[in-house]
Amino acid sequence: MNWYRRFIAGRYGADHLSIALMLLSLLLMIAASLSGWVVFSILSLAPMAWCFSRLLSRDIARRRAENEGLLRWARGLTSRLRRIVRRIAGIRTHRYFRCPQCGIALRAPRGKGKIRVSCSKCGNRFETKT
C-alpha cells in the first residue's frame, strides 16, 4: 500500500473537467450499447483516456487552467440559460424590445399603451407600444 501512496503523491486528481469527461465517456458507452454501433464504443475511449491522463498528471498548473476554462464556459452557458428562462417567465407581464441605437435588450410593462423609453446604456429616447 505504501507504493500506491508514493505513486499518487503529487498527482492532480479529480476535478469538474475529469468528472465531465467520465460522464461523456459513460454516455457514449450507453449510446453504443443501445444503438449497437461500434463507433460509439471506440469514441468513448478517448474521453476516458484523457480523464485518466489528467488524473495522473503532475502538471497541476496546466490541469487547473483547463478546469478553469470549463468552469468559465459553464458559467457563460448557465447565465444565458437563466436569462432565457427569466424572459420566458416574464413574457405575460412585460414586453421585450431592442434599443434602435445600441441594440441592448430592454423591457417595459405590458398594457401601458404608447410609452417613451430611455435606454439605460446609451441614453437614447424613443417611443414604443406596449
Image (spheres, rainbow, N blue to C red):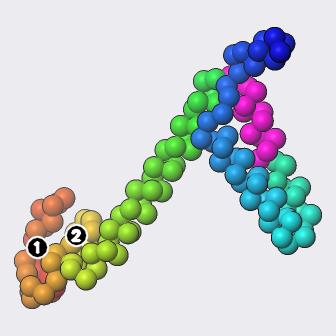
Quadrant containing the N terminus is: top right
Q: Residue at left 67%, top 40%? A: 18
Number of marks in picture: 2
> x and y percent of residue 76 in the render?
45, 52
74 sits to left or right of 24: left
Numbered range of the magenta stretch: 47-59
Q: Residue at left 56%, top 44%? A: 70
Q: Verify whether residue 51 appears in magenta.
A: yes
47 or 14, nearer to the observer: 14
30 in relation to 10, above or below: below
Q: Residue at left 12%, top 62%? A: 123
Q: Decide which of tag 2 and tag 1 comes sooner along the chain.
A: 2
> x and y percent of residue 19 in the render?
66, 44
Is residue 99 visible in the rendered image? The answer is: no
Q: Give the CA distance from mark 2 to mark 1.
A: 9 Å
Tag 2–tag 1 contact (CB < 8 Å): yes
Local SS, label 2: strand
Name the residue beneath numbered marker 1.
Answer: 117
Q: Verify whether residue 37 appears in magenta.
A: no
Q: Residue at left 85%, top 64%? A: 32
> x and y percent of residue 116 in the render?
7, 77
Name the residue beneath numbered marker 2.
Answer: 106
